[in-house]
Amino acid sequence: MNSFGKKFLFTLEADDNEGQPQSDREAMEQQLDTAKPQDFDVQQPGRQTLIDQHRDGQIKKLDECIGRLDIFIEFLNGTSSDSIQSQLHEAPCETLFQDIARSEKKKISRLAAELSSLSESFKGYKISANEK
């Protein structure tokens, strides 16, 4: 038998030894002095924890969207003098704003109502997400 065959046979015989550990955990137990194999196990966060963290991030993003929508709704159809509707309503006769008011006032109101409806829907989703 050549030297390669002898080494291969030696390796096979070494694998047949019953004193050898059967798993990685058993090998760790034989090699460690004071530590236990459990000390090396990594604890993964639970699935529910990850879901909760993801939902909390989405709720924050939803809050941001709701805030932006509300600001834009106030800009379109708010009661302050800075809103588009207020400026169109107060426009003197025969001006550019008066022409816009005549043709676009209903469209602006309809758009503000749709955006307000969307904002309220988002708020409903936020409330239902907080209850879970």
Image: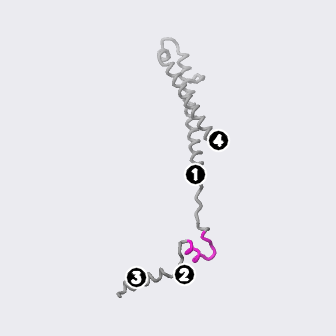
Indicate yes or no whether the magenta region holds residue 34: yes
Secondary element at image label 2: loop
Residue 18 vs 23, above or below: the answer is: below
Residue nearer the viewer, 110 or 4: 4
The chief SS type of the magenta part is: helix
Tag on residue 50?
1
- Looking at the image, is mark 4 or mark 1 earlier in the sequence? 1
Tag on residue 19?
2
Locate the C terminus and report the quarter of the image it occupies: top right
- Measuring from the top left, give residue 35's x and y in whole percent: 62, 72
Residue 28 vs 45, above or below: the answer is: below
- Looking at the image, is mark 2 or mark 3 earlier in the sequence? 3
Marks 3 & 4, CB-CB < 8 Å contact: no
What kind of residue is marked 2?
Gly
Q: Which residues are magenta?
A: 25-37
- Looking at the image, is mark 1 or mark 3 earlier in the sequence? 3
Location of mark 4 (residue)? 131
Q: For residue 1, what is the image quadrant?
A: bottom left
What kind of residue is marked 3?
Phe
- Looking at the image, is mark 2 or mark 4 earlier in the sequence? 2
Say which of marks 2 and 4 sits in front: 2
- For the residues marked 4 and 1, what is the alpha-carbon distance in whole angstroms? 17 Å
- For the residues marked 1 and 2, what is the alpha-carbon distance in whole angstroms? 43 Å
- For the residues marked 2 and 3, what is the alpha-carbon distance in whole angstroms? 20 Å
Residue nearer the viewer, 37 or 110: 37
- Looking at the image, is mark 3 or mark 4 earlier in the sequence? 3
